Amino acid sequence: METITVTVRTIDGHFKKTTDVPLDMLIQDFKEQAQELANLSAVPCDLILEKTNKILRGSDTFHGAGIQSGSLLTLTPNAEGGC
């Protein structure tokens, strides 16, 4: 299984982690794990690909979303709440 290395952080910079993820992993599963590690599981957040500043869809895989190794992903408050 092919993996890529990505960095995820919170918008305020209090949490930052670099990790390897499989290309076939769903964005939603990754976001949930990242929120748990950042102690934000109960807070609704979006995951944004910093390179394009676009919100990633949870139903996409890393491969399907075109995310490349070295990408920076940011957990940000969505319209319904805040991080």
Image: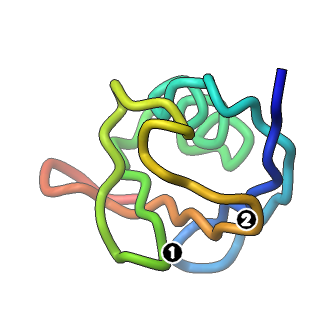
Question: Which amino acid is tagged 1?
Answer: Ile
Quadrant (top left/top right/bottom left/bottom right) for the C terminus: bottom left
In the rendered image, the residue lying farthest to the left is 79
- x and y, in percent, of residue 66 in the image: 48, 51
Q: Is residue 60 left or right of residue 63?
A: left
- x and y, in percent, of residue 70 in the image: 76, 68
Residue 23 figure quarter: top right
Q: Which mark is residue 15?
A: 2
Along the viewing direction, whichever of 31 and 6 lies nearer the viewer? 6
> Disc 1 to disc 2, how far (Cα)?
9 Å
Residue ID at (56%, 54%): 67
Residue ID at (39%, 31%): 60
Residue ID at (24%, 55%): 78
Question: Which amino acid is tagged 2?
Answer: Phe
Along the viewing direction, whichever of 20 and 76 lies nearer the viewer? 20
Residue 43 figure quarter: top left
Residue ID at (82%, 31%): 2
Secondary element under disc 1, as helix, strand or loop, is loop
Along the viewing direction, whichever of 4 and 15 lies nearer the viewer? 4
Residue 57, relative to residue 77: is it above or below?
above
Q: Is residue 39 left or right of residue 78?
A: right
Quadrant (top left/top right/bottom left/bottom right) for the N terminus: top right
Residue 66, relative to residue 29: is it above or below?
below
Q: Which residue is mark 1?
A: 11
Q: Which mark is residue 37?
A: none
Task: Using a 10 Å C-alpha cutoff, classify the residue at mark 1 as few (fewer than 14 neighbours), some (14 to 19) or many (20 or more).
Answer: some
